[in-house]
Amino acid sequence: MTSHSLPPLKILVWGCALALLALIGAVVLALAPPRLNLPLAVAQNEVVLAAPLVAGAGDRPIPAGTAVTALGADDLPPLEITPFDLTEEPDTLESWARYNRFLARQSQLLARMQGGHPTLYGAGFDPLPLHPTPAHLADLPPLFWVQSLSGVIGFLLGLTVWAFRRELAPAQAYMIVGIGFLIAALPAAVYGSRELALDGAVFRVLSSLNHLGSILFAGALMGLFWIYPTEIRGGRRAMPIILGTLGLFWVAENLQWSGGIGDWNGVMMLPMLGILVLAALQYRRSRGEPVQRAILKWLALSAIAGTGIFSILAIIPAYFGLPPLVGSQASLFAFLLLVHLGLAAGVVRFRLFNLDRWMWNVWSWLIGGAAVVMIDLLLLQVLALSQTLSLWIALALAGWLYFPLRQWLWRRLMLRGDAAPPLPQLVEAVAKADNAAAMAAGWQALLRQIFQPLHLTVLAAPTTHVALAGDGLALHIPGLGEGEGLRLEYAHGGRRLFWPEDVKTAESLLALAQNAYGIQAAQDAGALAERQRLTRELHDGLGGKMLAMLHRAQNQEDEQLARGAWHELRGIIAALEGKPRPLEELAALWRRDLGDTVEGAGVAFDWHFEGGEAVLTPIQQLHTRRLLEEAVANALRHADPSWVAVVVALREGWLHLSVANDGLAPPPEGWQVGRGTTHMRGRVADLGGEIVWQGRPGGGTLVTARWPLPSSAAAPP
């Protein structure tokens, strides 16, 4: 049975059993040495009692801080106890000679702990017989459980993600990270929580396993950044190469072919630097892809922050030959557990839209803390200042330089685009609209202005409330039109996802806009009712009389005059009815009426129409008809042309009109502004467009006008 055929639950059960066995093994090894109940610590380069030690019943306790010098036993001479023997992590011992001597002394001290009648020697008290007791679970320090449980939880998180996403390469890499964390954490918990000594051979194996787990952890983490959220070239081959290279160093280290055990800290800094480089490459590749960038932010925040804290407080000081900047590096394993929690969220894409706002705060404070530590280390190493003085200088430099820079970047990067309050924009785009239809169009324009989406589309089904969609990729907002829903995608030009704060902003604006829309819709309904009443009166009264005049016309001139008046009345009635009509249908009417006018004057007429699926509002219908009629009338009245050509075209969401003639009128630059041209300019301005008069080569005049249709937001060609 392959792993792909196993159900996730069975994988998790087997994984829990394996983790439990590993934890039990670590506990057994940690409890193997006898307990001397001897609280030891290092102070002023000597080993001292960390707490008062009771020598026996009725004896005065040996006070804390008393120096401890040696440990002896029957048939074994006293062996000096030095701070060297209390080294928590052997990686800090630098040379192989010191490492081997450390392990040998561990075996010698353990022999005295297990020998008959171990005796403690120290300054200020007589040789003190000790009474070893078997170790119990209660004897294990809290830091043992911090390390052990961090490793177990990290392993189970990786296994859980892999069990449900086995087909994904990032999930596979994440599982290897979890395995490495478990292998690294449990051995470190055993030798890091020892009372005084472990068997040297056992210590060597545990240290080797810790390094093997660290290789898997760091190498797989670097490989994860190579393939996720996008696969960089060669990503599938990268992780085996990384793990293989680090594995060769691990083999050389076990054979003691490297320069020293201390080289390990330098080697482990290489994957960390690689992660930084890959994170920068992934950030560049995710430009314009907010989902991928949000995933990257999760990965970078969790991986770089967790491993960065561990490196700054433990690995980097060890590389410079300094002790960890915390009491015990075991406590830092909790930060590595945060790496797993963040990686799990990034791999399964959990609540990505909640990250952008507070990610900046986390990163800025992390960098601020790192700046203090790095400046402090630099002052200690280069200027050889005291720890207190170097710390104060580091705090001052960070406060004077870094934090002002942080605030400046916050204003430049995070507040950009949010400075203008949305209420004035709402008033400008919605509340000042002349009618409900314009208000609905203004609502869409307002949403474009505030959220700057790459795409704004009308949903097929209406939406009743504001909601995030697609992990923050889109924002669904009700439109102002009845039964309308809008979908905004890729906020701020694709630079970020939508946030929960965007939902609150949209809800506030929607409530105000809907109130204004309701009032405007009621006004429009009243105006429509009045227009319908006027339409009936015009049609039934004046319309009937005009038809009678048309049928009773005595000659062709009277008939044309009556027919023209009838067409004018029909246009006015259509505008009052307030019914949108297709452009193609209107163009046929305009061609008929304009052709009758031009050809009736004995002038050749040419018509060209480039249509599309567009609908004109009554106001657009009236203005377009009047513009065409006025342009044709001016040509016939002032230019004495032999032909008139009219073009009506819909191009990229803009309606284009042109009227040309070959008449004898002077160039437009010499015209006096009259009522006709003034009215034409006013109509085009009402439509949001532009109009131009110009002379034609060889004689004649060309009038062109264009304006956008509300159903399209295309820019003019």
Image: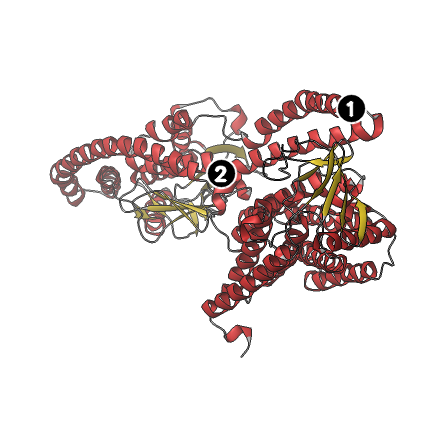
Residue 434 quadrant? top left
Q: Is residue 630 left or right of residue 159?
A: left
Amino acid type of the residue tagged 2 in the rendering = Gln
Amino acid type of the residue tagged 1 in the rendering = Ser
Q: Position of residue 651 (x, y in %)?
A: 48, 47
Determine the residue positioned at 62% across, 27% down. Answer: 406
Relative height, residue 356 to residue 240 (above, below): above
Along the line of sight, which residue is nearer the eye, 337 or 399?
337
Relative height, residue 607 to residue 691 (above, below): below
Q: Position of residue 221 (x, y in %)?
A: 65, 54
Residue 341 visible in the picture: yes
Q: Is residue 253 left or right of residue 173?
A: right
The residue pinned by badge 1 equals 386
Q: Residues within 10 Å of mark 2 (few under 14, many from 20)?
A: many
Extreme residue toward the bottom, this view: 1
Along the line of sight, which residue is nearer the eye, 632 or 65?
65
Q: Position of residue 150 (x, y in %)?
A: 57, 51
Along the line of sight, which residue is nearer the eye, 384 or 488?
384
Q: Which mark is residue 452?
A: 2
Q: Secondary structure at mark 1?
A: loop
- In this figure, what is the number of numbered marks? 2
